[in-house]
Image (cartoon, rainbow, N blue to C red):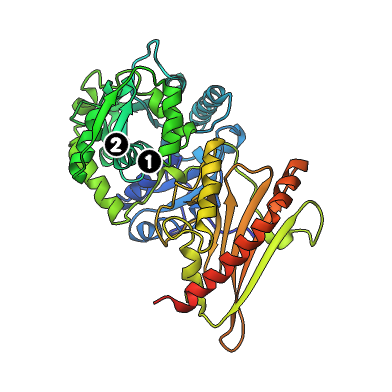
Amino acid sequence: MEPDYCAGSQHNMNERQILVTGATGYVGGRLVPLLLHKGFNVRCMVREPRRLTGRWNGEVQRSGQLEVIYGDVLQPASLTASLTNVDTAFYLIHSMGDGQKGFLEREKQSAIAFAKAAEECGVKHIIYLGGLGKKDGLTSAHLESRHLTGDLLRAGTVPVTEFRAAMIVGAGSASFEMLRHLTEKLPIMVCPRWIKTRTQPIFIEDVLSYLIAAIASQKSEGHVLDIGGPDILMYRDMMQVYADIRGLKRFIFTVPVLTPRLSSYWINMVTPIPSSIASPLVEGLRSETICENDDAQRLLPVPLTSFRASVEQALRETDDLQIPTHWTGAVRGEIPRLLDTSHLPAGGHGLIRDVQEVKTRASVGRLQRAISRVGGRVGWYYGNWLWEIRGALDKLIGGVGVRRGRRHPEEIVIGDAIDFWRVEDCRPNRLLLRAEMKVPGRAWLEFCVREESEGNNTLVQTAYYFPGSIWGYIYWYALLPLHYFVFSGMANKLVYWAEHAE
């Protein structure tokens, strides 16, 4: 039976409401609870509705109503149900970090399909968040796609408010995490010329204030609004401000030989940000990203936060583990098929399993907590140095590595990234992780707690692997001895922690 993805009281389909696309992303995931707190009825259109299961329940109970519905801008037929009876639609979809060719064409198709469906469904207003920057000879493909998306949305009959922002500063944002890790880890930095390019960063809360203010403002309809904070800074200035806040001494030197591509590879190795995401971020810094006018403030007078105050707030939230959304939350590209372990073949059919069962007197609650801590700073209980090596190798071949860490040291929701895994299922007695590292095949890691009688319980840890090709089989069996020791050691150490932790 499919789970019920609707939350709150019964939704009145005759009542118009707000649609949020990209609700699993960094901005969309923060916008939804704010809209609910303000009493709006919100519909989230996502490609994988189960990823929002259980989110924002507190906000729903206190204020607005929430509905989560399937929709994919690359499947135009799915958009009608999402846009029916919608008054205002937020378009927060983009392909940054897909790492696939043809993303510009996909962006184009997506915008055309959405604008057409919005027109057919009688949507009154589209609010779009794009990228700040002039069109010139240095315009990156990513920024070009952001501008093209806005042009195509405006080509329809539905009025559009387009906001263009440069670097968004906030706990967990890709731009902030890149700045944070570069400054924290490198006391002496030899940097490319783009660190002297001026930009106008903006605090995430100010971005959200602009988006919400546009809902009730007919004055903003039909406008392209540049939004930025009150400070215009070079990237090196931002690193120095961050270092000053942290009490760090940093020396920055500029050289002309590091291209944006080489810079993105270096960022990939030094920070958790993969080159597929670092590349458009760096490309965007090749030319100035500064507001060309003050139309946004004139039409929507939002109080703005200084860069220093933005960084201080982002650091407080990071240190206090108050990170509601993280750059790792969005799954780009094709949505992988969910592993249904209840219908797996008993043997053969290309499926390889490694099952570790460990009986214990530890309580169910202790086992659940031990499972919830895997990855991140805690690591994988056994052979952490082997996991680090695997992550470093993954980084070298363009993978995500293990430095993504996790959003919170113990809290887990579906869709979270944990090192080079993605949470596919999260229940009291089950955690299912899908591998996102580079591997010749598809892999999952499952932790289950089986409750026994008389206080005995069993941890069942299962690795699933579909090789997919002869190279997949060679990969698995070449590492079979290592897999045995790592998986066996992990299961036993996890249980040991559950039995002996304070």
Q: Quadrant of residue 437?
A: top right
The residue at the point 65 percent across, 47 percent down is: 337
Please tell me which residue lies in front, 459 or 499.
499
Farthest residue in the bottom direction? 454
- Is label 2 in contact with label 1 (beta carbons under 8 Å)? yes
Residue assigned mark 1: 27
Q: Can residue 346 be seen here?
A: yes
Residue at screen point 48% across, 42% down: 330
Provide the residue designation for mark 2.
207
Q: Amino acid at mark 2?
A: Val
In this rendered view, identify the residue nearer to me: 297 or 487.
487
Gap in angstroms between the C-alphas marked 2 and 1: 9 Å
Relative to 481, residue 163 above or below: above
Question: Looking at the picture, how far across and down is residue 145, in whole percent?
Answer: 46, 22
Amino acid identity at mark 1: Val
Q: Which x, y percent locates residue 385?
A: 50, 54
Q: Nearer the viewer, residue 284 or 305?
A: 284
Sequence order check: which comes first, mark 2 or mark 1? Answer: 1
Of residues 356 and 291, the one nearer the viewer is 356
Residue 99 location (% of width, % of height): 54, 31
Q: Is residue 461 above or below residue 434?
A: below
Q: Quadrant of residue 1?
A: bottom right
Residue 214 in sight in this render: no
Secondary structure of the residue carrying numbered label 1: helix
Mark 1, Cα crowd under 10 Å, few <14 / some 14-19 / many 20+, is many
**x%, y% of residue 502?**
39, 77
The local secondary structure at tag 2 comes to: helix
